[in-house]
Image (cartoon, grey):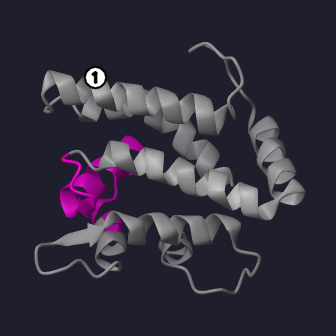
Amino acid sequence: MYFILLLCVFVRQKFADFHKELDEKRQKQVKIDVEKWWKDFIFRRQDVSKDTEISETQFVDMLNGELKKDKAAFKKSIEDCFNTIFDVIDTNRDRSISEDEFLIAFKAYGHENVALDTKFFKAYNPDKDGLVPLNIIVQSWIDFVVSDDAKEKSLVKEAFEAGV
């Protein structure tokens, strides 16, 4: 869950910066999607302004409380969260992620090791067009966040253990 907090810290403004090559309409939609993600999944639908801050402890406690209360509802919330943020990453809205989209996203998250990020992307076994279906990537992140088994195989976990 710590990763989700780190993701929050970097993503909010960075995506706006990295999506400047998009047309004005798509840039506006990216901003709306990021703000929705920020309010609904980071601040958990609390009434917040752009200047509101939340501590790591508060964030993790909120998530742990939701997980303990109702794991199925928590999993659904995490699924919605990742679908929302990956909609931001999927700049052309084709419901697949290209290597370029993946690398832009990880750069927005503060990752500068393109070789590791590329290796992570390739672990998803892109199709002949170099694309990975969005649902496969989203599911890998959901499984990583909600897994009760620390020994369970996970592309996301392996990427973090490799230094991503």
Residue at 55% from the left image edge and 50% from the top image edge:
80
Magenta range = 92-117
Question: In the depicted view, which residue is nearer to us: 67 or 5?
Answer: 67
Q: Which residue is mark 1?
A: 28
**Residue in the image at 20% along x and 69% along y:** 131
**x and y percentages locating residue 67 in the rendered image:** 81, 57
Q: What is the x, y in percent for residue 151?
A: 70, 87
Q: Quadrant of residue 71?
A: bottom right
Does residue 96 belong to the magenta stretch?
yes
Q: Quadrant of the C terminus?
A: bottom left
Q: Nearer the viewer, residue 54 or 81?
A: 81
Q: Left or right: 83 with respect to 115?
A: right
- Whether residue 53 is visible here, answered yes or no, is yes
x 81%, y 50%: residue: 66
In the image, residue 92 sits, relative to residue 32, either above or below, namely below
Q: Residue at x 19, y 56 (%)?
A: 100
